[in-house]
Every structure is written in C-alpha cells, then in structure tokens.
Amino acid sequence: MSEFTPVLLAPSAQVGANLQAWLAGNGGLGLRRALSDPAAIIPLLRQADLRGMGGAGFPTWRKWAAVAEQPGGQDKYVLCNGNEDEPGTFKDRVLLERSPHQVIEGALIAALAVGANQLRLYVNPHQRASLASLREAVQQWRQHALWDELCGALGRPLELHVVESSGLYIGGEETAVIASIEGGFPFPRSKPPYPAEQGVDGRPTLVNNVETLANVPHILRNGADWYAALGRGQAHGSKLYSLSGDVLRPGLYELPMGISLRELVFGQGGGMLLDRPFKAVFTGGPSNTLLTAADLDVALDFDSLRDRHSSLGTGAMIVISAGTSIVRKVAEYVDFFAAGSCGQCPPCKTGTYQLSRLLRRIDTGSGVTKDLRALESLCELLPGSGRCALVDGAVTVVRSSLEQFGDEYRQQLLDYPRGG
C-alpha cells in the first residue's frame, strides 16, 4: 500500500483537551473559513461526498440541508452521537478522549451550517476518560474568541452541553438519542417524521456520529478535492477501522476508504494468529453480512460492500480464524442483541430471544433438526418488525451465517443427534 498520512489520528490532532495545541496545529481554520461563508458549507460537503460514519453511510450534506431548510427563528438542535456500544467498535471513544477538539469544531460548523442554537454532545457514560476530556475541551471553547464570533454569526447564543447517554446499545439509534435528550427512556420512534423535521421537543434536529463530525474541520480547511484524494477508486476520504479478533495486531487504524480487506487484515493487522487460515469477518460490527476468504479483495467502502450485500457499518472488523465456531460467535452476538432490545416492539423482544435460545441449543449440542428449521423460519418472519434496525441486524448475521456456514450448523446436529 502506498504511504498514507492519517488525518483524524495524526499526531497533531492527538492533543487531548489542550485547545491551544489544537489551534497551533491548524485547528480552528475550518471554523474560521466556515464563518467567512456559511452558505458554502453544505455545498462543500456535497462535493466532498462525506458519508455518515455511524453505520448507514448516508450522505452527510443531505441531512444538513434538510435541517437548514427548516424555518428559522426557532430552536434547532445538533446532536453529536457518541453512544458507541456495539461489540468490536471503539473508534469514537478514541477520538473523544485523544482529540475532542476536532469533534467539537465539526459540531460547531454543523450548528453554523444549519442555523442551530442548541448543541448536545451525547456520550456513553461508561467512557469516563472520553467524558472528562470532552468536558474540559468544551470549557476551553466557551472562553475562546471564536465562540463569540460563532454566536454573533448565529444571531443568538449557542447552548452547548455534554450529555451522558443511557449506556444502552439501543440508545445509539438516532430517534432514541432524541428521546434521551428529552429526558426519557431511549425508545426508538417510527419514521416519518424524520428528525430533520421533528426531533428534540418537536424541533428540527441533526444527528451525526462522532467520526462524521471529526472529518468536517479538515474538509473545510483543505477542500473537497483533498478529501476525495484520500480514498481509493471511487471512494472518498479516510476511514477508521476497528480491527479485532484473531489477528496479530488488533487496533484502530485510519486508512484510505476503499482499501481491501486483505490489506487491512494481512497488511495492517499482521495476518492471522498462529498462522491459522482466515475464515470470516463480521463487518461493521456483528449486525451485518459475513464476508469470507472469497471476499478478501473486496474494497472496504460503503458502495463496494453494498454490492456484496454487506455493509461497512461503523468500520468494525471482527476477524475469525479457522477452528473458531461460527455458530458460537453468532450465538454470542445474538445474545447481545436480545439483551439490548428495549422491549417496545414485541416481535423484536421475543424474536431476538428465540433466535438466541435456538442458537444456544444448537451450539451446545442440544439442538434438533426442527430447531434449525425454526431458526430459518424466524429469519423470514422477523425483518421489518421493529421500529429500529436491531432485530434486522440480528437476523442479518444469523441468515448470513446459515448461508455461508450452513454445514457447521448441520454438523452440530449430526454430532449430537436428538431426533427432530
């Protein structure tokens, strides 16, 4: 791989809560340029093709434009989503702890672009170091001249607060974030209406992930062409890949959007533990389609993985080697989803529980053939039955594992025949 210089994880960005150090390394220039021409912010993000890094990969400019188009003279909200609670995902906590100022600057630019006077930084309460760093950084911004200049451009004071999330997995879904900010339990809500029209207290609301906002100051400072050139092929920008599992060098890697899975695992990750063969990877966390050795040369970007009927998601890559039971790993992750279901939608709560129960029976040798048939049937019945994507994610990983590694499931039944 050609030499790549990190942006979000560059040494100049890893300054903790020291605002002066951030500004000395060209931080603040993005906000200054945004203040000089606020109307140019959203078109620039459109040209750069910045996508949402929280999982969906939705074009960032479209979200921003939808909020900006709402009538002024009312409260508008920007919510920075740092709930991050999915297995294998650890990028946002690193940014918040080591480089909170690029996240805050991106959020301030977002507030300016959409005309928001309410800004909330929503963070998982289990990430104590991230919260401490972020709170200290916020205090420094409030005392800087750029803060006063921004409030002047908005025409009214900006209210910025750090808010601890519920710490629940479901609390990261964007409508659940809104419910939490309003002071309630993080129950997801049906859409439409979308947050851009009716979010916090019925006001227009923009919800973006930590990594998404961290990219914004750099794009404003360096331009759309610079950002596009960071990626590979048709993909733009860089991406934070949370690499874990059966690799020699797990960790957080900032690399070009569009590098291959092979480069990530065998180049950056140093290859497989104990030189075992590569078996599979859970992409974007454990709620997406599994990729196998046949997919090692796929480009890791939103569009390429969608073409493979998979998803980049958050950029988490959980690598599994030969000799590791796919049934057991899937059972562990579905246990997580079953525990994380909020209970608002009965098909989700009972469906994820039944998926978990069946997987555990098969994994422990208590399963019978009809359990496998029931598992397949639930994968047909459950999709779309919840207000959020939790049950869909659980079904996706189960269905994918059945398609790719169905022999492992059947072998479990053959090894421990109990009829059925």
Image (cartoon, rainbow, N blue to C red):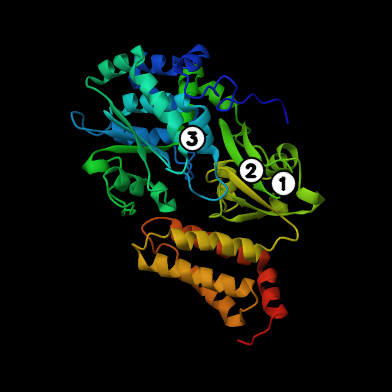
Are there few (<14), some (14-19), or many (20+) residues within 10 Å of tag 1? Answer: many
- The residue that disc 1 covers is 247
Of residues 156 and 3, the one drawn nearer to the viewer in this rendering: 156
Could you tell which of marks 3 and 2 lies nearer the N-terminus? 3
- The residue that disc 2 covers is 243
Q: Residue at x 56, y 30 (%)?
A: 237
Q: Are marks 1 and 3 in contact (CB under 8 Å)?
A: no
Are there few (<14), some (14-19), or many (20+) residues within 10 Å of tag 2? Answer: many
**Number of marks:** 3
Q: Secondary structure under badge 3?
A: helix
Q: Residue at x 75, y 58 (%)?
A: 322
Residue type at mark 2 is: Leu
- The residue that disc 3 covers is 129
Could you tell which of marks 1 and 3 lies nearer the N-terminus? 3
Furthest residue in direction right, as rendered:
275
Q: Position of residue 27 (x, y in %)?
A: 48, 17
Mark in front: 1 vs 3: 3
Q: Secondary structure under badge 1?
A: loop
On-image quarter of the C terminus: bottom right
For residue 28, which numbered disc appears in the image?
none
Q: Secondary structure under badge 2?
A: strand
Q: Position of residue 289 (x, y in %)?
A: 58, 56
Residue type at mark 3 is: Ala
